[in-house]
Image (cartoon, rainbow, N blue to C red):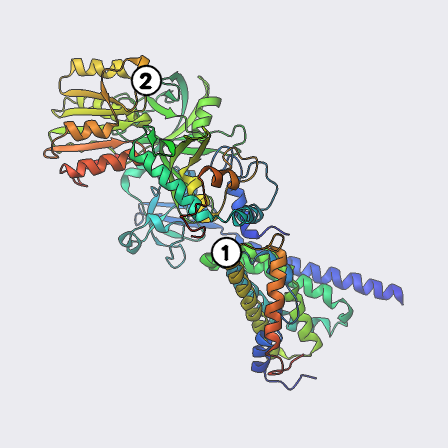
Amino acid sequence: MDFMIVAKTVGSLALVSGVLAVIISIADKVLNNYGQCKLDINQGQKQLTVEGGSSLLSTLAGQKIFIPSACGGKATCGLCKVQVLSGVGAGQVLPTEEPYLSEKERAENYRLSCQIKVKSDMQLLIPEELFNIREFICELVELEDMTYDIKRLRLKLPPGEEISFKAGQFVQLYSKPYGKVKEEVFRAYSISSKASEKDHLELLVRLVPDGLCTTWVHTALKVGDQVRVSGPYGEFYLRGDCEELIMVAGGSGLAPIRSLVYDVIEKGLPHKMRFFFGANTVKDLYYMEEFARIEKDYPQFTFIPCVATPEAEANWQGETGFVTVALENQVDSGQGKEAYLCGSPGMLSACIRILKSKGFTSDTIFFDEF
Amino acid sequence: MKENPRDALLRIDMEAGRLIKDGFLGTDPRPLSEIISQDLDTLAALEVSHVILGEAMRQLTRKGMAAMGEEVDTGDYLVKTEEYMGWLGCPFKDARRAAKRNTRVTDKATGQQMRWSDLSIHLIEEHAFFQGKGSPFRLEPEALAAFLRLPRPDRPAEA
Amino acid sequence: MRPPISPWIIFLASIITSNMILANFLGMCSYLSVSTEYKTANGLGMAVTMVLVLTSALNWLVYEYVIVPLGLVYLQYIIFIMVIAALVQILEMAMDRFLPEMHAKLGIFLPLITVNCAILGATLFQVIRHYDFLQSVLFGLGSGLGWWLAIDMLAAMREKLAKVKLPPGVSGPALAFIITGVVAMAFIGFSGIFVIQ
């Protein structure tokens, strides 16, 4: 009698758990297995079949379609916008996407590809130029300290490979796990080398206290290491519909400006150039001889380094004060000029304010904040 | 008490190596909401609100920003800001971001120094989050309030 | 066997006079730990309501068509809990697939709800009182809404009180209990309007 009850109990419980387990597995297969999703890009120009479940950004990267991102998919840069015509659930924009999508963009179905998951077939519109973006496993051939917190990286592309970029654009650098950082991280760094040099890339990386990627570059990376990059990306490049270029940079913001300056010179363009380089102290200056040499060889280029608080012993003879002071004093109007700025948010907003007061407009000011 | 599932989710990104190298939690084993509520208790005992603290920090940082990186004398303090390119997102997933700006403040009277970032101002002002114990960037509420000389009789203790 | 009470009376009573938290003190654990922030509490309340409705309905069917016919009434507690756990799992997957915005807001609470005793409590109440299907569903819905109401009230009060100076040791769980007790006493004022237990 007792045995029967025990048997019945065990049997029924086993049966019920079994049935429930089967139901859950079926549900898991049906619901969680997004399965193969078809991505239709640009009305049939490209058709891909991918595994669902990951973000659109990483899914496309896995298919070698690189959407720009400066923040590694954390929704703080807003660069990874893509038009999603169908396949992403009733078009409701997520709270993390809201700050980066204007009314117009939402009406046109723009979404942040790092925030939406591939769950079903999708129809996407991706700008043509992004198809030129490629991935390169480069070799680090030079790692030089330019200042106490800025390193120059010289990367050699794999043999036979070339990168075509517009001066001013950036690449994404992928760090490897090290120390407490368990995963690969990627960040945007502007290319500082000449656009004419297609088999090498140079980047300037400034150590950010507590930074994930910059700490990797400054502590874990060694000459000879393999470094993965993708690019080129970015809307920061020469338009040139003017007579003079006003360039302003601070810290590692010098990188794209250097590339731009060489670009103008190598192409023999007629533009006058004035480069205002802002540094906190004399210790923060670098590439001084190089720009002095360019100034000497090419009269169309003027180099104006500004040191905010020069150390007494450095005997600094150049401009002092923040770079905005020199900008205010030496630039008279926006007439016939374009401005190219690269630096921290504070520097950018201060400079933009001054330039706008001189007559520059949103159409003649270009800046890179990453 | 059990850790709130939302806290468990936020904790993932607050660990070291996710958003910033050392993370926001240090070696603190307490659940996130407990860290915040215990710091709020300390503040309540001091009769200072985290919003007022954040505001005071922001005002000092603004003065440093106006001086464009030069050290500025605000009367009671010397303030110097330093900036890097790019943005840092708030780990509380409120879609807010802060510039990578560090402010170093020296109390002229005592010589004591305190450092904070723009993100920590937001974390304190909006989320009452002073970071976990053991985090190199944790600001102890009593120390911060004392440093900022809050509450002051001419300012209300509440937001 | 079915009690002659209108399902709608059961619905209203489960919110007001037989509130899961305030009258029955069920589901206290997550109620206390998640009520420090109003937004989070609101989310949990929504999730609990949804789960309660579905489990009430499902467990009624399981009781009627599986447990009773197979003579497994002595195993009903275990079977109900297993059904609740399975349902919550499937619900989370379905929400992630079909309602991603809602999943982003509520999804993290679902595992916590599995062990919320208000869920099992509602099921057991409806079994003990022999409710029929409609009564059970409305009972589940009302219990959920009542739980949601209670946690919203507590969270709102705790958020306001978080800014106030309190005697040492009072803030935190002690305060939550005090508030809950006072609100429960206030709700006793409703007793007698509808009687379902």
Q: Is residue C170 visible?
A: yes
For mark 1, what is the residue?
C96
Does A211 sit above or below residue C144?
Answer: above
- The residue that appears at 59% across and 71% down in the rendered structure is C143
For mark 2, what is the residue?
A311
Q: Are marks 2 and 1 in contact (CB under 8 Å)?
A: no
User: What's the CA distance linking mark 2 and mark 1?
Assistant: 59 Å
Q: Depth check: give the residue in front, B70 or A103.
A: B70
Q: Position of residue A89 (x, y in %)?
A: 41, 57
Q: Quadrant of the N terminus of chain C?
A: bottom right
Tell me the kind of residue under disc 2. Glu
Q: Position of residue A203 (x, y in %)?
A: 34, 24
Quarter location, residue C124: bottom right
Q: SS class of the residue under badge 1?
A: helix
Marks 2 & 1 on one chain: no
Dot 1 falls on which chain?
Answer: C
Q: Depth check: give the residue in front, C173 or A23.
A: C173
Q: Depth check: give the residue in front, B100 or A369.
A: B100
Does A94 sit above or below residue C193?
Answer: above
Q: Is residue A43 left or right of residue A247?
A: right
Crowd class of label 1 (few under 14; some 14 to 19; many from 20; radius 10 Å): some
Q: Position of residue B11 (x, y in %)?
A: 54, 44
Q: Residue furthest right?
A: A1
Q: SS class of the residue under badge 2?
A: loop
Q: Which mark is residue A84?
A: none
Does A343 sit above or below residue A147?
Answer: below
Q: Is residue A139 left or right of residue C192?
A: left
Q: Position of residue C154 (x, y in %)?
A: 55, 63
Tell me the kind of residue under disc 1. Asp
